[in-house]
Amino acid sequence: MFFFPFLKQSKMSEYIEHDADGISVGLVKKKSYTYAEPPNEMILESGTRLGPVTIAYETYGELNKDKSNAVLICHALSGDSHVAGYYSKDDPKPGWWDIMVGPDKGIDTNKYFVICSNILGSCMGSTGPCTYNPKTVKPYGLDFPVVTIGDMVKAQRALLDHLGIKKILTVIGGSIGGMQVLEWCAQYPEMVVSAIPLASTTKHSALAIAFHEVARQAIMADPNWNDGNYYSGEKPKLGLAVARMIGHITYLSDESMRIKFGRRLQNKNDFSFNFDADFQVESYLRYQGSKFVERFDANSFLYITKTADYYDLERQHGSGSAVEAFSKARAKFLVVSFTSDWLYPTYQSKSMVQAMKKNGLDVSFCEIEAQWGHDAFLLPSKRLTDLIKGFLERVYREI
């Protein structure tokens, strides 16, 4: 998941009244919830005990009296809890899905109480490898246990319990966020009224695992990685930048790269005849890599990509059968894929839809024509906005 720098960015003051998609939620604040204090640590799927656990989160809108309007948003690999609004009046850009979340938008905060938490293992406020290990009073590093999508969802469940929410009107997310959506439906079916997995899959293909492994190797080959113990010295910036560049390519599409870059040169006159960034696409990838190292932790990247690779809904909930994996689900589903997404192609979404239908579930499916690749769900799309808005309104009416 990433932000396109070639899209127009505006300060909060330009959005606070109206933007193209509705009204901004305005100023927001990150919150945190800490639980699983020893000796009542969280027991992970690996059997390891972890505690205390802190979850960073944000909320938008108001919870109604019967607490039936909660919408949980699950973010992707490098995302965070800041899904909409601004932290200050001088904030240069809003939350990562501000186009979708807010008053009168696809996820209307006039109607719904929206929650987004930072996943376990991340570096954006929740407990992860860069947070302090209470046993050593140093960052966990590689002493942090490998967590699963199931562990992430279990932590989200603890947060919702803290907020007093027993039912989720809709759980929605794209990419790795979509995996969390599916896990919610399998692990806590009694809590989920409806679910919207976007550009997602029940398990990674060999291709997706391969790209993640190359990215991880780039980080671990950086001499500054130091087996994950880099927090008191130089960080593995080069390795993380290369890892981001690799991942970034998978989020795009051949068509989007052709339209945006083609073979256009940085210097229109000629090649440099050295290893500078001759092509615009080279310069763009280097820029994305350098920006990423300013805001993300290399160890968190390792852990989250491994988490995604481990996820296998059929194996964990269905003894290898997708139909069995969805047998306990009760939610109404809206499944969305995108034509140019070659990381999680449409056939993977269709496969989960077939398994849902064989269980007699209420399922709507749409493949949206989009040229921007895997990350199309993050970009302005009237079709996607209308789909989500209409689906949410139908589900809310029915309850």
Image (cartoon, rainbow, N blue to C red):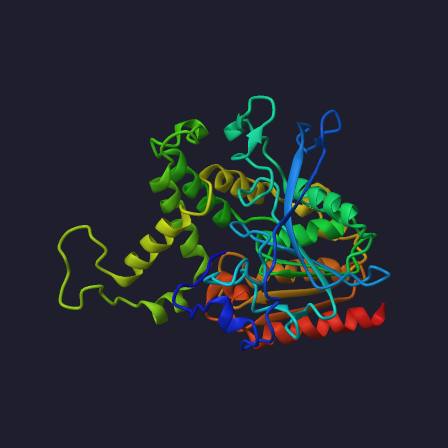
Do we see residue 3 in this rendering?
yes
In the image shown, does 378 or 53 lie closer to the viewer?
A: 53
Q: Is residue 70 above or below residue 392?
A: above
Do we see residue 318 in this rendering?
no
Q: Is residue 27 above or below residue 320?
A: below
* x, y percent for residue 289: 37, 50
Q: Is residue 355 left or right of residue 175?
A: right
- Residue at (48% x, 37% y) in the render: 299
- Residue at (59% x, 40% y) in the render: 310
Number of numbered markers:
0
* x, y percent for residue 368: 57, 72
Q: Is residue 364 above or below residue 220?
A: below
Q: Quadrant of the C terminus?
A: bottom right
- Residue at (55% x, 26% y) in the render: 143
Q: Is residue 11 left or right of residue 147?
A: left
In the image shown, does 397 or 329 lie closer to the viewer?
A: 397
In the image shown, does 97 or 22 lie closer to the viewer?
A: 22
* x, y percent for residue 96: 53, 60
* Residue closest to the far top: 136
Q: Is residue 351 left or right of residue 241?
A: right
Q: Quadrant of residue 262?
A: bottom left
* x, y percent for residue 266: 22, 63
